[in-house]
Amino acid sequence: MSYYQQAFDVTSQPAWKALQEHRDVMQNFNMRRTFLADPERFHEFSMSCCGLFLDYSKNLVTQETRDLLVNLAREAGLAEATRAMFAGEPVNASEGRPVLHTALRRPMGDSLLIDGHNIMRDVHAALAQMTDIVGRIHNKLWRGYNDKAITDVVNIGIGGSYLGPELVSEALLPYTQQSGVRCHYLANIDGSEFRELTARLNAETTLFIISSKTFGTLETLKNAQAARTWYLAKGGTEEKLYRHFIAVSSNKQAAVEFGIREKNIFPMWDWVGGRYSLWSAIGLPIALAIGMANFKDLLSGAYAMDCHFRDEPLENNMPVLLAMLGVWYHNFWGAQTHAFLPYDHYLRNFVKHLQQMDMESNGKSVRQDGSPVSCGTGPVIWGGVGCNGQHAYHQLLHQGTPLIPADFIVPVVSHNPVADHHQWLYANCLSQSQALMLGKSREEAEAELRGKGLPEAEVKRLAPHKVIPGNRPSNTLVVETLNPSRLGALIALYEHKVFVQGVVWGINSFDQWGVELGKELGKNLYGRLTAYEAPPAEDSSTQGLIDYFRGRHRG
Ligand code: F6P
């Protein structure tokens, strides 16, 4: 029986029990002392691959911890799970689907049979279709209803049909093509977002991509309809609508019914999850911004990470190490959240993408067979761009009560050297992970205050406030200049990290039934807000809020 059909209970594994005992031994582990005692620690706990360098020495780990964590991954059947995912077995068991975002990155000439059909042909045919439209738009051959060239592209999509493309097109801004177009994203159903965006656009030169795997997502369909109305109101014609609306979807019929020409519909497949889809034609706005050559470099970077993840031994496998460190803190040290702190303006949207990737994947409470999990699963993912966070929430990282492991991400070379800013940015990044690790002892705090000449009573009064516990764990990922291939590797790194954790917890990382309930209730509530007469809501809070709205909009 495959791993995705079994009731796997990680907590009954020998390695889990060994880790519980080891956790007690590690209770008084002190990173500061360990660094002093072992000058080789940085080398022992760091590695590089695919243009990324990972320092994980500032963690509450010894070599024994690493061995035990790797054993746990082994006992969880990670090798078999990885093989099954890459081979296209239905590892998304609740939906009976393979999970093959890795296929989207595989080179031309590879083959992968799913139900006897070589899906690699479809993947490369879609890339060719993308190359064609990108070329036509960049070369000004694709023209709007009154023959003006396209200058702006609006991606209408939400969730995975938005976050990944937005992250990448903004992260790779320095690679924007001269001949490229401006990319905009319209995700929320909030009319303010629609108004603010369209106010800056010219309908004659704007192309809308309706990006929706299902072509059934409310926000996307409402925005698509509003965009169509706007286009017509601005002088566009029904006859030339096809020049302004294209789609990416696995639901061709619905896209055609919306009015999109069949040849302008780019494919998506059931075997690609929304949050893993930026590598498919969902990434079309990326390709329109940075060109197909750069888009293909993004794919090759991710492919290099796929090969690393699939082939490297677990103890030297970057996604596995990051995943197991997460398991260590979440399941054995009670860490409920994980912070991502990119020190790079271009990665400012990374956290949003990771939030969907991680929390929609591993926010689960039952195992693959439907039985309840016996340990915590996905942590809360949060964070934001450094240095801004230093002047906001880092205080809690340093002196708050919760233990919050953090990933720092920083490029070693900036695309935009301004005076000595990048040196300062890099120094700030290191200062944070160092401060988290070193902290400040009571003795140091007192000595510092005495050094300022404060009276002893004042020293004693202030010292407790200045004590910083330290010993707080973090990883630092250093990226060479952030280029398309390294960004591809970086995103794929986290995709595989999330996968590994899902395997260890025995859950299905590829469904998202939880979000469906809200969608169903949303439709029902819309009816109650707008119908002339509607049955009362199930609870008085919801009814009270409905009445408030109806009272305001009466007549
Ligand atoms: O709401 C969750 C979700 O289903 C995500 O998984 C998905 O990325 C998003 O909605 C958008 O879905 P679609 O691409 O089908 O419009």
Image: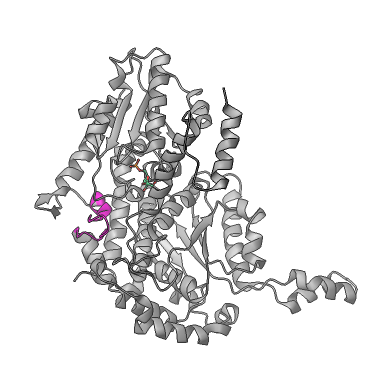
> Could you tell me if residue 210 is visible in this image?
yes
Apparent side of residue 417 relative to residue 291 in the rendered image (left or right):
right
Residue 32 occupies quadrant: bottom right
Q: Quadrant of the C terminus?
A: top right
What's the magenta bit mostly, secondary-structure-wise? Answer: loop
Q: Position of residue 401 (x, y in %)?
A: 64, 69
> Could you tell me if residue 341 is visible in this image?
no
Closer to the camera in the image, 161 or 92: 92
| Residue at the image position 18 percent from the left and 71 percent from the top | 1
For ligand 1, which image quadrant applies? top left
- The span picked out in magenta is 88-105
Q: Where is residue 272 in the image (x, y as percent from the top left)?
A: 27, 49
Q: Is residue 354 above or below residue 253?
A: below
Q: In this view, does 274 lie above or below 377?
A: above
Residue 16 occupies quadrant: bottom left
> Farthest residue toward the left?
116
Q: Position of residue 241 (x, y in %)?
A: 31, 19
| Residue at the image position 9 percent from the left and 52 percent from the top | 116
